[in-house]
Each structure stands twice: as C-alpha cells, then as structure tokens.
Amino acid sequence: MVVNKKRCVAMLLAGGQGSRLGVLTKYRAKPAVPYGGKYRIIDFPLSNCANSGIDTVGVLTQYQPLELNTYIGTGAPWDLDSITGGAFVLPPYVRSGKPGEWYSGTANAIYQNLYFIERYSPEYVLVLSGDHIYKMDYTEMIRFHEQKGADTTIAVLRVPLSEASRFGILNTDEELRIVEFDEKPKQPKNDLASMGIYVFNWQKLKRYLQEDARNSASSHDFGKDVLPAMLAGGERMFAYRFDGYWKDVGTVESLWEANMELLTETPGIRLRDPEWRIYARNPNQPPHYAGDHAEITTSMISEGCYIYGTVRNCVLFSGVIVKEGAEITDSVIMQDTVIERNAVVRRAIIDERAYIGEGAVVGGMEQITVVGSRAQIAPASRVAEGARIEPVGELAAKGGDAE
Amino acid sequence: MIRNVFGLIYAGEENHNLRDLVMHRSVAALPVGGRYRAIDFQLSNMVHSGIRNIGIITQKNYKSLMDHLGSGKDWDLSRKNNGLFMLPPYDTSQNTSLYHGICDAIYAKLDYVRRAPQEYCLLTGSYTIYSTTYDEMMRAHIENNADITMLYNLDPPNTDAERFKEVRIETDDSGRVCDIEFDSHIAKSHKLGMDIYLLKKSLLEYLIQSAVARGRYNFVSDVLIPNLHSLRVQAVEHQGYVGRLHSLLSYYDLNMDMLDESVRWDLFHAGAPVYTKIKDEPPARYMATAQVTNSIVSDACEIAGAVHGCVLSRGVTVGRNASLNGVIVMQDSQIQEDCVLENVIIDKYVTIHKGRHLIGAPEFPVIIRKGAVI
C-alpha cells in the first residue's frame, strides 16, 4: 500500500483515566470530559492539529474508550477525514505470535504503534496529551525545533515558582537547551514546566523507544524514562516557551473553575475565534429558547436548551431543560439534563442526562457538588454540598445489568 | 423508508413579495428560525424519509444556496451512490433564456431525471416549511392507485394577504382532487396545497415533455388543472404546522410562530432533527445586564440588552440598554447600546449604531437589507 510520506504525524495520548475527576470519569476517559458548553477536552488538541495543518493523528485510547471512539469517528468534525491523512483510533491490540498487552506507559503506547507511524515515514512525531485546554499552533513549535537543530523539543509554560514543585520542571541554559529534568522538585531552580507536548525527530525517537522496550526496569513513561535517557545520551533537547492559555482540568474544582472563567468579561481563552476555530461534534439541535419568565444572566447557553427558570452564572450544554421556578447558580449543566420546577442547584457540576426532581435542592455555597450522568435526584430531596452522586451506566439506565 | 424515490426541488422560483430579502439570494437560502435556511426543512424531510438522491434546480442568485449546501455532507447527502445534485441553468441549444416555469426548468434538466435510478419522483418547491416524513404519502399513493399525490393543510383564505401562487383544492370523499383554484383572489377552499407532488418518474417525463411541446410551463395551471379528469390526483392532509414564504409578512409570521411551543415541538422535536450547515461557533453568551424572554437565540450571540419575542441568528450582538421587541436578526449583525427596535427584520452583517430607534408594526415590519450601516 502506498502511503504518502508525511512531514509530521501527531500521536495523541487519550488513555488517561482522570481518576481525580471521580464520578465524571467513571464511564468516560478524561479527554472525553465535556467543557465550555459544547466541547470535550480532546476537541482542543484535535482542533489545534487541524488548524496547524497536521492531518494525520493517531489517538491512543485504552480506558473506557467507547464514548471517545464514537465521538471521534472518522475525524470529520475536525476536518481530519482527508484522503492522505485522518484520525485513527489506536487501541491496544494483539500482535501475531505475542500475547496482547495493555499500554503500560505513555512511551509504551507509542512503541506499540511503531508500525502506524512507520507507514508515513515522517520526519517528526508530535506527541500530545488529550488532557489540556489550550490553543496552540504546532507549526511554530516545529519551526523552533528545526531552527535549533533539535532532536527533541518540549513545550513549556512559566509557572509561579511557589507552585513549581507540582510540575515537571526543565532546567535550561541560555539557549533554552535542556540540561536537567527536575520532576516535582522540592527546591525548584527554574519556572519552566513541561506541558506534555513533545516534538521528536522520528528516527531518534524510534531508537530510544526500542531501547526502552528492552529495558525491563523501565516504567515506559516519557517523563520518567525516555526523555531522561535521551538527555543522558547527549541528544539536543530544547524547551519551547508557550505563553498562551493552558489549563489542566484534572480535578472537579479545576474543571468547574475553567468553566466559570469563561463567564468573566475577558476569558483567558477566546472560544469565538474565526482564525482558530475549536471544532466539536455537533448535536444538530435548534437554537435555544428562553421562555416568558426566563432570567438568564452572565451565562453561556447552547443549542437545544429550553430555559423557563432562572440561570445565573452558569454554563449550559446542549439540550438542557430548566423548568419554571427552577434556580441554578454558579453551575455547569451538561448535555440533555433536566432540571424540574422549583429545583435549586448551586455550585454544582451536573453530568449528562441527569434528572433533578421537582423542588430538589442540590449543592451549597462553599464546596462543589457533582451529580453523575443519568443520576436521578428525587423530588424535594436534598443533595448536600460537596456530595458526589454516582452515575448510572447506560445499560443500567435502560433496565439491563449494571456495568 | 421510501428508497425508490428521488427528490427534485425547484429553487428557481422568484418571489418579489419578499423584496430585499431575496435581492441577493434565492428563497431556498432564506434564513429562518435562527440557524436554518428554508431548504433545510425540505432536505431533512426527504433524508429522514430515506430519499438519498436529491436534485436542486436553481436559476438566479444561487451562490448563497451553493455556499450553504456544499457537498451535502451536513444532510448526510455526500454519498458514493446518489447524493445531492446541484442543477444550475446553462445555455444549450434548447435552453437559451430564463425558465418560464417549473416545466421548462425540469425539461432543461431531463438528463438528470432520466438517469435517476428510482421509480418515483417527489417534486417540490422551496418556500414551504414543515417537518414530516413522506412514508404516509407514499402509502396513500399506492393504496389509492393514484397518478399524482399532493399534500395540503387547512388554512382559510385570507384576502388581505400577499399571495404567492396559492394552490387551493377541492376534494371528493375519496380524497381525489376535483377542482383547483390557482392564485385566485376569490378562492373559497380551506385546503391549501403544500407545493409537493409524488408521481412516477415516467409520468413526470411524459407530462413535462407534452407541456413544453405546447409552450406551457406552469405545473399547476398547465399540467394539473387540464388533467384533473384524466389523471387520478389524490390529496393527503398534513396535520402539523406549515409555514409559507409567500411575502415579507408571512416570512415575519413564520419566524414569530416558532416562538410558540407547539410549533417548535412540531418542527424540531416531533421527529428526527432538522439538519443544517455546521458552523462550529461557541455557545451564546449572556452578560450580567441581559434580559431575554420568549426568544430564540443561536450560538455565538452576545447579549447585554433586553430581548423580547425575538429570533436571533448566529453571532448577533445586542449592546447594553438596547431593547428589541418582535425583531428578527440574521447572522453576525450588531445592535449597539441604547437602540430601540420594534418589529424589524434585520438581514445579515447589519450594524445599527448606538441609540437608533427603528419602529415597525407587527403587520408591517421594517426591513433592513444585508450589510446596511445605520
């Protein structure tokens, strides 16, 4: 089979479990977590690829892949269904003559898909994670990589020194050449934190991945094993400084905050950007409708919503219904959830297809409350602030066995 | 699912009752209901009925329609077999001028009709808006052993309204059409045709060729009416909502009707979704000072003012302290602070500067044409 040679192939690590998101990631991988009224986290790296002219993206999935696989499909919503490229979902598989194995680490996930990358014999491989919200032109990073004559380039973000001990810190010389990796340092010497975005010369990366695979002591992780091995091997590694918006929504609090930030006068990330559109799969709903007694202020409302009650400082995904007398404040309500009459929701994240019964009170003024997908909150009941209501599996919701 | 049918949509009809709205676009491309174009409803009806081969005959001003439809992908019509076919006019030895009517338009595109592998044709215009599937119409067609089956809804004659080629029918007990009043000022029938006809492709070819051979071009007055006795023309009632783009006022009314819960339910939620071009815009934003009631609001709108009884398309901004009542605003128009607008239709890319007052009446809306700066 003839496959066009590609300058750059992107590999998107989308297997993250996102366990700190708790009930929100029980039935979905972290990259499939909804954000901003119509997006999922993975829309950001996928749109960045499309907008950067990278049309071949391997998406490595492992944990709860169904929602993510159906979401990505052929990649058409991100314009990735091209003749020579495409979006390819790459789950672990069984090779002939070998036992099947899960992806044991980030580097192992790429290693297990060497053949996929080899089909394109690319010059560069761009490794991305599906966990962050940001807009970035990867072509500029690749240009930097070329200018520096680098073997590996790692995108970095300046963080306050006081918080640097939470990150993987890169110590560099004046030319931004990396001289040391400092994983979560107690005494940080620098404020450049790795964003988990790497550009590699493919031939170099291939060699190190093969060596790493033979090393039984390795945990097969980029940050812990492969990148330090490259540094020890004297490869030219550079830090590429990125100064745009970048947000890790790894916890319930940070996901809630990232959504609330969109409601400020000038949000850190501009979603309405004709030059850099963020694409998403479209639910094909009519525009939303605000009823006779609706009160909607400082909020984002998506297609297919029907609002008859009061909505203050909220982000509503498509198809949400807020009935008369209901009052929702400082909350994120995901797709197709119904808030019944006179229900009160405060500082909460309500996942998809949930049902908040008439007169129920969910959440309070301090801690964030989470209601899982398809959960049913009984009328007039109370969900205490900070509670985590378990989601109901798709089959169970249809009366089948629990998953 | 009616797989043995192809759709033929005549989007070439001009209707000057719609004035500035159709100066640069065909009726089929008129924005309605916030995010849709008129033709989205017909295309979605056909696709949800199982029709996979649809030809669209265009004449003038069809650029906006082509932009909107593209390859037909957003209607699931970008297919290896069949799909969406744009049929723009071109000069041939037989066809050297504007179409007189639907008959010579189809005549000019007979090649497409002949090559369609389906046995039946569903022939329709582009200015009637409703949501349905055509399975029931097909069942009735076969059961009645009809030559032609048409749809109608009940809508009493309104002598004041600006009509556009209204087709009013009388039927006998079996539902057979026995009389047609076409474009009549003194019409009596409450049964108003919906501009859609189901017939065998072979019959369509024959009727079109024999009409054109006699210098006749109108499908209703030249084909249907003279043949009411020789052909079995059956009518089936559509019970749901029907909107018509007959005039500026009916355009205004159609959009305002969508604020009614039962109309919205019937058009958007009773069956399958209405497909339209995907624009990838973020959700609408409401500012702290927004006051919005009884309104349809599309993605990427930014609202800081008061909006009551309005239909806003994508990307509309409403400034602080502005007040909109009964206003239709099309894509990407800007209404700045302190404006007062009542019963206005604002086309795309319009800017209304700070503090302007524009007041129309519900039965006589003011219209602001595309790109105007006021």
Image (cartoon, rainbow, N blue to C red):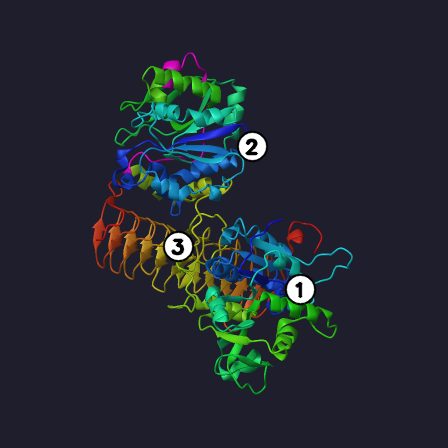
Labels 2, 1: one chain: no
Quadrant in the picture for residue B187: top left
Contact between labelled residues 3 and 2, with CB atoms less than 8 Å apart? no
Compared with B205, B68 (above or below) is below
User: Is residue A186 in the magenta section?
Assistant: no
**Three-letter residue code for mark 1:** Tyr
Labels 2, 3: one chain: no
Residue corresponding to mark 2: B1
Q: In the displayed structure, does residue A97 sit left or right of residue A331?
A: right
Residue A293 — which label? 3
Residue corresponding to mark 1: A111
The answer to whether any part of residue A356 appears in the image is no
User: Is residue B227 in the magenta section?
Assistant: yes
Could you tell me which residue is drawn at 43 percent across and 36 percent down? B42
Nearer-N-terminus badge (1/3): 1
Compared with A167, B224 (above or below) is above
Could you tell me which residue is drawn at 42 percent across and 69 percent down? A268
Label 3 CA crowd tier, 10 Å (few <14, some 14–19, many 20+): some
**Residue B219 horizontal/vertical position (percent):** 36, 22
Q: Which of B62 and B139 is in front in this view?
A: B62
Q: Is mark 3 on a helix, strand or loop?
A: loop
Residue A254 — which label? none
Q: Tell me how far mark 2 sits from mark 3, CA to CA.
A: 41 Å
**Residue B359 horizontal/vertical position (percent):** 22, 49
The answer to whether any part of residue B219 appears in the image is yes
- Which image quarter is the N terminus of chain B in? top right
Q: Which of A7 and A63 is in front in this view?
A: A7
Q: Give the range drawn in magenta.
A: B223-248
Q: Which of marks 2 and 3 is in front?
A: 2
**Residue A397 horizontal/vertical position (percent):** 64, 52
**Three-letter residue code for mark 3:** His
